[in-house]
Image (cartoon, coloured by chain):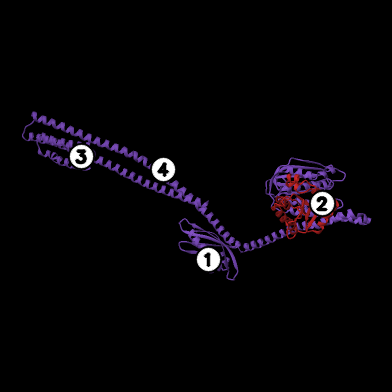
Chain colours: A purple, B red
């Protein structure tokens, strides 16, 4: 669970790290673009400014040249031609400058060429006009047109320059606008990016913090677990070993040494050192098991013996399993347990069980044979008594006849005892088959068996409808018979017996007699009578073999009948409970599992 | 061969039981001839002898030395000459196993030795005067054991 959380969190942190790196690179890129935009923008302004200045300069040089030229025309003084002459040079310089700065697209390039042409034709005009003046030829028609042409050219130049400056300004504005939108958007974007990065960093921090807490908790648990394991090893006589497959190195836990009867770390943990302790008879099997483990990387339960230094032999149970850690390193982790006590106890128990089984079989055999073989002489005694009675009764004295009668009663009672004992020992056999049986039929049969007594005692028997249950039929028949006989036998002298048989399906949790019983539902059948009853304190005694609550003179009976009932109920995994009240009656309650 | 009496054989190792048996028939005065044998070997030797007179009813004790009643029953039923003899098992015990086994092997009735002489006489009289033809036809596990 915790391991999964941590590995999940590792993936989460990795993703956040990658996103953060990406965002930071993005921020860097945007910042670079932003700054280069700014630089471009200012460069553009400077260029436009320079272009405009140069254009202004050209205009002013041309004006100077025009002025100088006009003054020359008026005064014919050649000194006035000086600015005109320098102007040409300076205009050329400015043009070179403009060409160098200017990189403003084809339109401006074309404008520049046109301007250059205008300037050339202006200067040509100037030269022509000057030639007129030098020749002393003034105010002719030709001169006038020339002069007028000069004005037109000058206007065209002015117009062109202002057009170029406009174009340059427009250009600047357009670019400026474009950059402006970029420049306005970028800081907001960068700020948002920064915020997002910050959020991610905070999330990672809290995540890492959380992981730290978890790791701390796990570490705590691990240390507790480790201590518990050490204690468990000591208590349970366990030892733990680890085999690092790649490096072929072993570690043994302290208690593994103790299981071997050595002090912790008494020797270097190697396979060979361990093999030394294995019982010579088991070494071959042990080595084979280990070899299989190395091959299949899994060791099922193995059993072998070891011999401690003091010579005592111990039984060991071993188990091992391959474990691959996160780095893909293979190790086989195994455990050994000293199961000597367990085995000894098991052997002891088995021996005792065998003995018990033998005893039981003997007892059962004895019981059967005794009752069976005892019958034969008894039968003969009874037959001889009957012969005596028939043939010799008249030859005996009164007391002789009385003795004979006593012998007869004793013999009859002995027969009763033997019959019951035989019945009891037959009930002992648990290998009878369970059959789904209608209990009403069994009850009816039992009633038939005691029909004579029912009539004789004028007994009234009422019963609920009983269920169909999986039982050993002849045993349950016997059970019903015994319970009915019991109620009829211990009835009151002056009162006709009333026997009530009721049935109910009960749940073990609802019945006080069924506390601590695993099964859920039970068939509950009660036999209640209005007989002489018994003291509740004898409720358990009456189920004991040969136990009687009344003397033989009052009530016949061998004290076996209810013992048989108990045995039958035991055979069916049920419960029988007796409740009695003197002179009121007895209630026998049977619970049969469903 | 005079055939006006009922020929009865008893195989029982117990001397007292043989005595009761013969006494009972003496007192019954039923025109019977009773032969007794002390064990299964004696019985089978007699039945297998050339001049043996086969009985009308054979009473067979189960628990006998040398050769027990079950073995005798097996041999008799396997021999076509004697397989028609009416066989009454005559035993002290009436264990379910014995009743089951002898019924399956083809005995005709199972008598639990009674414990009074009066009853013994009654049982023997009833068995000897039984209509075996009728009894065998309607024989089943419930009427196999003779109720007293």
Do the residues at pointers 3 and 4 share their chain?
yes
- Chain label for disc 4: A
Marks 3 and 2 sit apart, C-alpha to C-alpha, by 177 Å
Q: Which residue lies under the disc numbered 3?
A: A57
Say above or below: A205 vs A117. below
- Chain label for disc 3: A
Q: Which residue lies under the disc numbered 2?
A: B32
Using a 10 Å C-alpha cutoff, classify the residue at mark 2 as few (fewer than 14 neighbours), some (14 to 19) or many (20 or more): some
Looking at the image, which is closer to me, A347 or A317?
A347
Of tags 1 and 2, the one toward the viewer is 2
Marks 1 and 2 sit apart, C-alpha to C-alpha, by 83 Å
Q: Position of residue B57 (x, y in %)?
A: 77, 51
Using a 10 Å C-alpha cutoff, classify the residue at mark 4 as few (fewer than 14 neighbours), some (14 to 19) or many (20 or more): few
Task: Kindly tell me whether residue A270 is visible in this rendering.
Answer: no
Looking at the image, which is closer to me, A36 or A276?
A276
Helix or strand or loop: what does disc 3 sit on?
helix
Say whether marks 1 and 3 touch (CB < 8 Å).
no
Q: Which residue lies under the disc numbered 4?
A: A192
Say whether marks 3 and 2 touch (CB < 8 Å).
no
Using a 10 Å C-alpha cutoff, classify the residue at mark 3 as few (fewer than 14 neighbours), some (14 to 19) or many (20 or more): some
Q: Which residue lies under the disc numbered 1?
A: A284
Q: Residue furthest front?
A: B1
Q: Position of residue A294 (x, y in %)?
A: 49, 61
């Amino acid at each position: 669970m915790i391991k999964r959380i941590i590995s999940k969190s590792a993936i989460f942190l990795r993703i956040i790290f990658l996103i953060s790196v990406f965002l930071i690179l993005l921020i860097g890129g945007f910042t670079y673009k932003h700054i280069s935009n700014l630089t471009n923008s200012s460069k553009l302004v400077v260029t436009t400014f320079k272009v405009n200045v140069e254009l202004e300069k050209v205009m002013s040089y041309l004006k100077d040249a025009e002025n100088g030229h006009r003054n020359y025309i008026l005064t014919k003084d050649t000194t006035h031609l000086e600015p005109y002459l320098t102007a040409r040079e300076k205009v050329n310089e400015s043009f070179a400058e403009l060409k160098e700065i200017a990189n403003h697209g084809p339109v401006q390039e074309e404008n520049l060429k046109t301007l250059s042409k205008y300037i050339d034709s202006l200067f040509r005009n100037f030269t022509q006009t000057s030639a007129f003046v030098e020749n002393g030829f003034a105010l002719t028609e030709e001169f006038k047109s020339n002069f007028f042409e000069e004005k037109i050219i000058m206007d065209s130049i002015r117009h062109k320059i202002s057009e170029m400056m406009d174009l340059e300004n427009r250009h600047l504005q357009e670019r400026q606008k474009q950059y402006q939108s970029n420049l306005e958007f970028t800081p907001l974007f960068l700020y948002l990016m920064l915020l997002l990065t910050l959020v991610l960093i905070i999330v990672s921090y809290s995540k890492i913090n959380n992981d730290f807490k978890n790791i701390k908790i796990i570490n705590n648990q691990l240390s507790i677990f480790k201590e518990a394991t050490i204690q468990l090893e000591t208590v349970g006589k366990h030892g733990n070993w680890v085999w690092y497959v790649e490096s072929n190195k072993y570690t043994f836990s302290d208690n593994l040494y103790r299981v071997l009867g050595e002090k912790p770390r008494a020797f270097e943990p190697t396979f060979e050192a361990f093999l030394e302790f294995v019982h010579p008879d088991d070494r071959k099997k042990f080595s084979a098991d280990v070899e299989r483990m190395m091959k299949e990387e899994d060791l099922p339960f193995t059993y072998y013996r070891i011999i401690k230094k003091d010579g005592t032999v111990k039984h060991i149970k071993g188990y091992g399993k391959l474990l691959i850690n996160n780095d893909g390193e293979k190790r086989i982790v195994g455990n050994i347990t000293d199961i000597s006590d367990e085995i000894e106890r098991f052997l002891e128990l088995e021996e005792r069980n065998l003995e018990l089984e033998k005893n039981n079989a003997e007892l059962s055999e004895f019981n059967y044979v005794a009752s069976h073989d005892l019958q034969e002489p008894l039968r003969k005694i009874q037959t001889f008594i009957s012969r005596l009675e028939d043939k010799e009764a008249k030859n005996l004295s009164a007391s002789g006849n009385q003795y004979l009668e006593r012998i007869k009663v004793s013999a009859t009672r002995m027969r009763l005892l033997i019959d019951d004992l035989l019945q009891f020992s037959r009930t002992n056999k648990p290998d009878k088959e369970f059959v789904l049986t209608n209990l009403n039929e069994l009850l009816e049969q039992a009633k038939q068996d005691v029909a004579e007594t029912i009539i004789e005692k004028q007994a009234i028997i009422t019963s609920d409808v009983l269920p169909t249950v999986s039982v050993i039929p002849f045993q349950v028949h016997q059970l019903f018979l015994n319970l009915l006989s019991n109620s009829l036998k211990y009835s009151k002298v002056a009162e006709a017996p009333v026997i009530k048989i009721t049935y109910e399906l009960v749940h073990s949790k609802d019945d006080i007699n069924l506390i601590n019983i695993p099964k859920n539902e039970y068939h509950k059948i009660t036999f209640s009578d209005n007989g002489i009853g018994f003291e509740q304190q004898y409720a358990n005694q009456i189920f004991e073999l040969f136990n009687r609550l009344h003397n033989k003179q009052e009530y016949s009976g061998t004290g076996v009948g209810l013992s048989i009932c108990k045995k039958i109920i035991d055979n069916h995994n049920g419960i029988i409970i007796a409740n009695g009240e003197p002179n009121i009656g007895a209630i026998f309650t049977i619970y049969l599992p469903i | 061969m005079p055939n006006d009496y009922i020929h009865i054989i008893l195989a029982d190792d117990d001397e007292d039981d043989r005595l009761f048996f013969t006494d009972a028939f003496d007192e019954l005065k039923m025109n019977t001839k009773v032969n007794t044998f002390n064990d299964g070997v004696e019985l089978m030797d007699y039945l297998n002898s050339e001049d043996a007179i086969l009985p009308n009813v054979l009473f067979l004790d189960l628990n006998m030395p040398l050769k027990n009643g079950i073995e005798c029953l097996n041999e008799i039923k396997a021999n076509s000459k004697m397989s028609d003899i009416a066989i009454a098992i005559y035993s002290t015990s009436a264990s379910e196993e014995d009743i089951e086994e002898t019924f399956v092997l083809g005995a005709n009735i199972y008598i639990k030795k009674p414990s009074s002489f009066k009853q013994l006489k009654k049982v023997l009289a009833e068995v000897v005067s039984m209509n075996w033809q009728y009894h065998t036809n309607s024989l089943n596990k419930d009427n196999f054991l003779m109720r007293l």
